[in-house]
Image: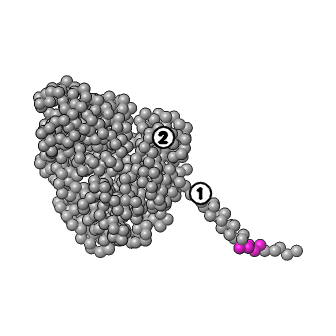
Amino acid sequence: MKQQKFKPSLTTVSALCAMALCAGAAQAVTLRVANQGDALSLDPHSLNETLQISVVGNVYEPLVTRTPDYKLAPGLATSWKQTSPSVWRFELRKNVKFHDGTPFTADDVIFNYERAGGDGSDMKSYVGQIKEIKKINDHTLEFITKAPFPILPELFTGWLMMSKKWCEDNQATKPVDRRKGIENAASFRANGTGPFRVRERQPSVRTTFSRNGSYWGKIDGNVDEVIFTPIGNDATRIAALLSGEIDVMDPVPVQDVERVKASPNLKMMQGPELRVIFLGMDQKRDELLFSNIKGKNPFKDVRVRKAFYQAIDIETIKSRVMRGAAVPVALMLPPQVRGFAPDLAKRLPYDPEASKKLLAEAGYPSGFEVKMNCPNDRYVNDSEICQAVAANLARVGVKINLEAETKGTYFPKILRRDTSFYMLGWTASTVDAHNVLYPIMSTPGDGGRGQFNLGAYSNAQIDDLTVKVGSETDDKKRNEMIHTAMKLHQDEVGHIPLHQQALLWGVKKNIDLVQWPDNIMLWKHVKVN
């Protein structure tokens, strides 16, 4: 008897194809990430804030990136070299396309230089050292800096590339300006070169990302979809992690760290962040905003600034508010950053009586009243820190009217400098002191200088030293200049450093991810086992 050959019908073929598709769909890996806040925009030049950079950094990419162990690595540029003290030549990666299929070229880089350095941008300090860009060809550029600047590649790790054509087609050539509440297409849609695309954006509710199937580079992980959800309430967020509704949580409230450690399905990823939390004071206005002192500004007097510093019980904040997840600091940069000066690492002593005496000497024996601006969804236990500071200052006669609010309203306010007294954090993502000296400690000026020096502290000697630090290649001379600048700032109490914040990520045990010290989470490195 002859064996009959099986000839599948069209129905059978369709069924087999459907089964194959179902099998493929079953293997798709979804990563569910929650944070206490949301990215306020998808525009990579609109807000220099860690969560925003972390989220959009999966869609947009820089010329220079980092390896999992945080070393510099080629990104959209394949190589770079300094051809003279003030000239850097960058070779761009070929055959890279934006998500809409538009090729990435030198014209896009020039456009991003103009956009990131223009009005409304929060990223001016990343391009502020550049005098001009010369296009050699479609994939070669020369960056001419205002002065010799040997750490330019480190700075470029924070500068993300947009499509010139897409921005022009969508009337998004200028950045979304958080200070003025101006929005455009880049607020809600995105078109980068990165490993993930934005599939759906619901601000403050949920943003869904899908893997870019035509990505130019290697994706180490196996995640196909990322669902990012802001969950503002700490108890709700930790409950979602413990129940398995989310896979990764950042940050874990310090009071819940032990609960996560005790869970059989979870692990804590904890380590020092490059961020320093500090207090800033308006030192420019003749009269403070939101204060009962009329016709004068107490913060212009170093005795008042020192009194505030010595009124703060940092050890109690460390033990009770932060539950040990913080390291008190005396400088505006942590020990892991190049240029840190160990001999300046001792804080002024906590001394309420000395604080009262300083206030009396400055002409405020009964203290005064002032408003303090603070976020409640940005840093680890941020509002609790501000409450502790307010309570400490109350003991020396200073009444603090604390205004703790979501970063959606907090950042536009303080970036407009509509504040007298505020809390902020800064991460030296280049791991170099210049990244603190230039944007935080220098007098506000052109090119992003002092852009985040929101109280307008000013010292001409520090400004001069900052320029020299940027150009100096001799480590010994450079560190001496950094030391001098840090000592000047410390003696004048330009800001009040509080502590180095800890990274506190709660993660399912079956997930491997890379935790960078700048708190950036790249999903291309995530593997769900």
Left/right placement of residue 528 relative to residue 98 reads right
Disc 1, SS:
helix
Residue drawn at the location 32% of the way across and 28% of the way down:
316
Q: Which amino acid lies under the numbered mark 1 shown in the image of this protein? A: Gln
7 in the magenta segment: yes
Q: Report the span colored magenta.
A: 6-10
Q: Quadrant of residue 111?
A: bottom left
Residue 86 drawn above or below residue 387: below
Q: Position of residue 152 (x, y in %)?
A: 26, 58
Badge 1, how many Cα within 10 Å: few under 14, some, many 20+? few
Q: Which amino acid lies under the numbered mark 2 shown in the image of this protein? A: Thr
288 in the magenta segment: no
Q: Which mark is residue 27?
A: 1
Left/right placement of residue 177 relative to residue 196 reads left
Query: Mark 1 or mark 2, which is nearer to you?
Result: 2
Residue drawn at the location 19% of the way across and 64% of the way down:
131
Residue drawn at the location 22% of the way across and 40% of the way down:
290
Q: Position of residue 362 (x, y in %)?
A: 12, 31
Judging by the rendered image, the residue that carries numbered circle 2 is: 236
Cα distance in 3D space between marks 1 and 2: 29 Å
* Mark found first going from the N terminus, 1 or 2: 1
Q: Quadrant of residue 425?
A: top left
